[in-house]
Image: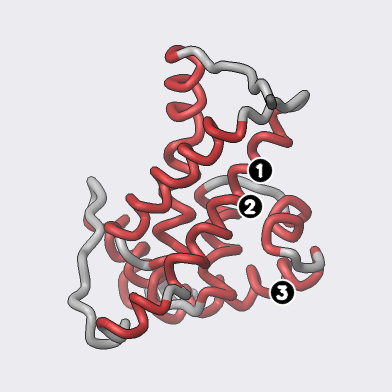
């Protein structure tokens, strides 16, 4: 019989509180859907608490949660049920709302980018991960991450030019 360490309610609340924005935000950036992001969020923390994993360093826990979030998000977006029912182009768009109108505009521009640019930008600016951490999470080389960040910034600059960027 495999005995796994039991987690206390306080420990679970602390872990969820610490990582909820990271997990939900990454799931939202990956799936593009608040409903799917909610599902991924629940699945990630359920998997974490059921796994009984313990980590010596907080960075390892964070990396595990990032990788699991990406994997579960990929599973949601690649499901045959989703593909058979409603193509993404025809799905009604569920808006994401932030407190400030500017944040909504930035999120809309970020969401319009392809996943290859959207995820590195999200992880870099919203989760403040280093290019090395992003490379590890996305299974890329650090140089590829830096290139995607540079190109993604340029795409955002063009998309938001009228609202945020002024000609010098």
Mark 2 near mark 1, Cβ–Cβ under 8 Å? yes
Question: Which label was assigned to residue 137?
Answer: none
User: How far apart are labels 3 and 1 at the CA level?
Assistant: 25 Å
- Camera-near label (3 vs 2) is 2
Question: Which quadrant of the view contains residue 27?
Answer: bottom left
- Camera-near label (3 vs 1) is 1
Relative to 140, 124 lies left or right: left
Image height check: is 110 above or below 88? Answer: above
Question: Which label was assigned to residue 67?
Answer: 2
Q: Residue 152 in the image: x percent, y percent?
A: 56, 74
Label 3: state its secondary structure.
helix
First in sequence, mark 3 or 1: give its number. Answer: 1
| Residue at image point 45% right, 81% down | 158
* Quadrant containing the N terminus in the rendered view: top right
Q: Residue 75 in the image: x percent, y percent?
A: 50, 66
Give neighbour class at mark 1: few <14, some 14-19, many 20+ (Cα, 10 Å).
Answer: some
Image height check: is 78 above or below 105? Answer: below
Q: How is the image coloured?
A: secondary structure
User: How far apart are labels 3 and 2 at the CA level?
Assistant: 21 Å
Relative to 160, 151 lies left or right: right
Residue underneath mark 3: 147
Q: Residue 155 in the image: x percent, y percent?
A: 50, 79
Label 1: state its secondary structure.
helix
Mark 3 near mark 2, Cβ–Cβ under 8 Å? no
Label 2: state its secondary structure.
helix
So how many labels did they put on this image? 3
Relative to 110, 62 lies left or right: right
Give neighbour class at mark 3: few <14, some 14-19, many 20+ (Cα, 10 Å).
Answer: few
Relative to 67, 89 lies left or right: left
Residue underneath mark 1: 64
């Amino acid at each position: 019989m495999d005995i796994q360490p039991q987690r206390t309610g306080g420990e679970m609340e602390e872990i969820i509180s610490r990582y909820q924005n990271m997990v939900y935000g990454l799931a939202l950036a990956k799936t593009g859907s608040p409903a799917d992001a909610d599902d991924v969020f629940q699945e990630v923390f359920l998997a974490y608490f059921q796994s009984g994993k313990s980590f010596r360093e907080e960075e390892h826990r964070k990396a595990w949660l990032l990788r699991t979030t990406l994997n579960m998000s990929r599973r949601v977006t690649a499901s045959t049920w989703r593909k058979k029912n409603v193509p993404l182009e025809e799905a009604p768009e569920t808006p994401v709302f932030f407190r400030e109108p500017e944040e909504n505009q930035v999120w809309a521009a970020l969401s319009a980018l392809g996943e290859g640019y959207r995820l590195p930008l999200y992880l870099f600016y919203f989760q403040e991960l280093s290019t090395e951490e992003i490379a590890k999470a996305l299974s890329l080389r650090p140089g590829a991450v830096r290139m995607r960040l540079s190109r993604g910034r340029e795409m955002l600059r063009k998309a938001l030019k009228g609202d945020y960027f002024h000609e010098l």
